[in-house]
Amino acid sequence: MTKKMITTSGAPAPIGPYSQAVEAGPFLFLSGQIAIDPASGQLKTETIREETRQVMENIRHILQSAGLRFDHVVKTTIFLTDMGHFAEVNEVYGSYFEKEFPARETVQVSALPRNVNVEISMVAWRG
């Protein structure tokens, strides 16, 4: 099996020693995304909805760069610093899927990179 690094300017460049995504066989493993606007390099965290939307747009661009869509996603992990944001994050997140939602867990953590409120990682399947 070979692996291929996936990179796009439509999502922020990694802020550490990792790839935006790695394709291994029929799977695409997307690193956790936070609400960095790739055009400006600035965080978009005015509201939790705006923050979640930016995260999902970053993920959309990574998926597209690999020739995939949200309906290819089979697993998602959502990290929140405050479970009180769950309903709003869930609403924005859910609007990116049309049917057959992926498996998912949502966990509360004490802190996230750059003091954001939400980070989302995904696994997609090219099947």
Image: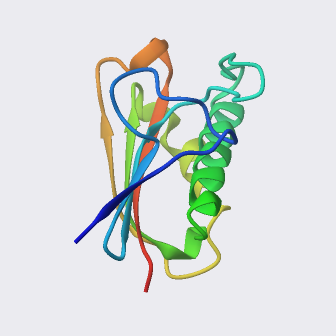
Q: Position of residue 17 (x, y in %)?
A: 33, 26
Q: Residue at x 57, y 60 (%)?
A: 63
Q: Residue at x 34, y 17 (%)?
A: 111
Answer whether residue 92 is visible to the viewer in this image: no
Q: Position of residue 6 (x, y in %)?
A: 49, 51
Number of marks drawn:
0
- Above or below, 113 relative to 101: above
The extreme bottom residue here reads 127
- Above or below, 121 relative to 115: below
- Above or below, 99 relative to 62: below
Splitting the image into 4 quarters, where does residue 43 fall?
top right
Splitting the image into 4 quarters, where does residue 19 fall?
top left
The extreme left residue here reads 1
Q: Is residue 70 left or right of residue 81?
A: right
Q: Position of residue 69 (x, y in %)?
A: 61, 70
Answer whether residue 51 is visible to the viewer in this image: yes
Which quarter of the rendered picture does the N terminus lie within? bottom left
Q: Position of residue 78 (x, y in %)?
A: 40, 45
Which quarter of the rendered picture does the C terminus lie within? bottom left
The extreme right residue here reads 39
Q: Residue at x 64, y 31 (%)?
A: 51
What is the image's colouring? Answer: rainbow
Q: Nearer the viewer, residue 57 or 81?
A: 57
Q: Nearer the viewer, residue 118 or 64?
A: 64
Q: Nearer the viewer, residue 91 or 38?
A: 38
Q: Residue at x 70, y 42 (%)?
A: 10
